Amino acid sequence: ENKENSSSRGALIVLEGLDRCGKTSQSSRLYKYLDEQGYSVESWRFPDRNTGVGQMISSYLANQAHLDDHAIHLLFSANRWEKRMLMEEKLRSGTTLVVDRYSYSGVAFSSAKGLDTEWCKAPEIGLLAPDLVVYLDISPEKAAERGGYGGERYEQLEFQKKVANSYLTLHDSSWKVIDATLPVEDIEEKLREIVLDSMTICQKGKPLSQLWP
Ligand code: DGP
Ligand code: NA
Ligand code: NA
């Protein structure tokens, strides 16, 4: 099998979940595995704190800047828009992207503050739709027990409970849910399996599409 077939595109793989669900370490394990297998793959995350917009988001999360809930929502969205072109180029050139958080975080976290869900979804329209969304499922209580909430703005049990409820209303039958309380190696194995399936479907010519399908 030729993994470099120029007609095949990469897959847009998104990992979602509450803070402390283990998403970040699973996405780096997945990246490392795919890379070692010889696939063209990159590890991305949102917010991307390296851009100008990302720096504003970062200081908001660190409670160093105060912004209206709507304004910060639009900045998170802008942070995804500023990477959209590059994202499409990478996917079309055959690179799979493993992305830690995406538009679903955008809607889940802002609607948890009480913003209208449809309003929250609107600025995400036209961003690339993921080929696979994996939700690492953990209760807010269990996540909080893991400790190490870094002290950023959203890292509080009561707020995470609201985020969990928002995710529940967002998630549809296309999402793959993995129990985030399983041993790390078991999660890793399940993740590999569903990601490789999704990559195969993309290689076979599945077209890129846009949010919200
Ligand atoms: P992380 O770097 O994955 O720990 O994300 C930082 C925090 O920001 C985390 O609590 C999740 C939250 N977050 C991520 N994306 C968005 C978004 O688009 N909108 C809002 N309001 N919060 C987000
Ligand atoms: Na965090
Ligand atoms: Na994280």
Image (cartoon, grey):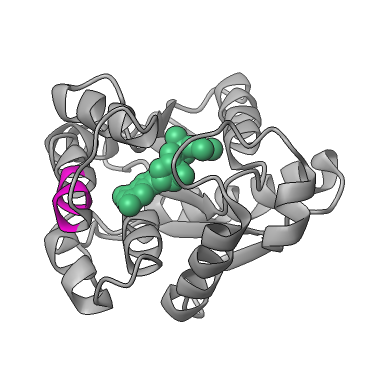
Question: In the displayed structure, would residue 55 be above or below residue 196?
Answer: above
Q: Position of residue 28 (x, y in %)?
A: 59, 28
User: Which residue occupies the foreground of this view, 169 or 82?
Assistant: 169
Camera sees residue 100: no
Looking at the picture, does residue 76 appear above or below residue 115? above
Q: Nearer the viewer, residue 112 or 1?
A: 112
View extreme (right): residue? 183
Relative to 90, 3 lies left or right: right
Q: Quadrant of the C terminus?
A: bottom left
Is residue 37 inside the magenta stretch? no
Quarter occupied by residue 146:
top right
- 53 or 97, nearer to the observer: 53
Report the side of 187 relative to 64 (left or right): right
Q: Main secondary structure of the magenta part?
A: helix
Q: Residue at x 22, y 62 (%)?
A: 209
The residue depicted at 18 percent of the width and 31 percent of the height is 86
Whether residue 136 is visible, yes or no, is yes
Query: Which residue shows up at 51% across the image and 69% down it?
Result: 162
Q: Position of residue 79 (x, y in %)?
A: 20, 38
| Residue 193 place in picture, x, y as percent | 68, 51
Q: Nearer the viewer, residue 144 or 76?
A: 144
The mark total stands at: 0
Q: Residue at horizontal 57%, vertical 55%?
A: 197
Is residue 73 on the magenta stretch?
yes
Q: Establish if 150 lies above or below 52.
A: below
Answer with the quarter of the image where residue 123 lies. bottom left
Where are the magenta residues, as a range?
70-75
Question: In the image, residue 24 lies at what x, y percent?
Answer: 58, 35
